[in-house]
Image (tube, rainbow, N blue to C red):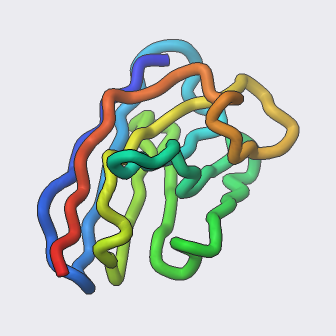
Amino acid sequence: VQLQASGGGLVHTGDSLRLSCTAQGRLFSNYDLAWFRQAPGKEREFVAVISWNRGRTRYPDSVKGRFTISRDNVKSTVDLQMYALKPEDTAVYFCAAAGPFLRDPTTDPNDYGYWGQGTLVTVSS
């Protein structure tokens, strides 16, 4: 699976932004898809995951209620809709794929074998 993320940019506190990730190759629908982010000087952080089966989602408390992950298996895309952005959301955002056919969606970046190149989101105060 080859992943290409896009949609990052500079926004203000409270704004919304939608990231998109397009996949090529293999059987996209059989993989869990996730977004992670990494701020300068910090470790990579889990943001959202959507499972290959039944579209189960998981979010950390830091983004729950503000971010929504979705996937389109026909278009081979996974999107991250972000609302009410905060300066602490500033980071490079990466899409990733794990699988195929995992039993449960995982939040551990070490479980993801495929990564996009990252897209920068900057939220100014």
In the rendered view, tell whether residue 83 sits above or below residue 90: below
- Residue 30 visible to the viewer: no
Q: Residue furthest left?
A: 10
Q: Residue furthest front?
A: 41
Q: Is residue 84 left or right of residue 103?
A: left
Q: Position of residue 47 (x, y in %)?
A: 53, 56
At horizontal 46% and vertical 14% (from top left) the residue drawn is: 25
Q: Residue furthest right?
A: 103
Q: Position of residue 14 (x, y in %)?
A: 26, 85
In the rendered view, tell whether residue 4 sits above or below residue 78: above
Would you identify the image quadrant in which residue 22 lies?
Answer: top left
Quadrant that contains the C terminus:
bottom left
Q: Is residue 88 left or right of residue 12?
A: right
At horizontal 23% and vertical 82% (from top left) the residue drawn is: 13
In the rendered view, tell whether residue 89 sits above or below residue 112: below
Q: Is residue 55 left or right of residue 35?
A: right
Q: Is residue 60 left or right of residue 123?
A: right
Q: Position of residue 112 (x, y in %)?
A: 63, 28
At horizontal 55% and vertical 44% (from top left) the residue drawn is: 34
Asked whether 6 or 22 is in front, the reply is: 6
Would you identify the image quadrant in which residue 122 lies?
Answer: bottom left
- Residue 62 visible to the viewer: yes
Q: Position of residue 70 (x, y in %)?
A: 50, 56
Query: Tag count in the figure?
Result: 0
Q: Residue furthest top?
A: 26
Asked whether 27 or 15 is in front, the reply is: 15
At horizontal 35% and vertical 78% (from top left) the residue drawn is: 83
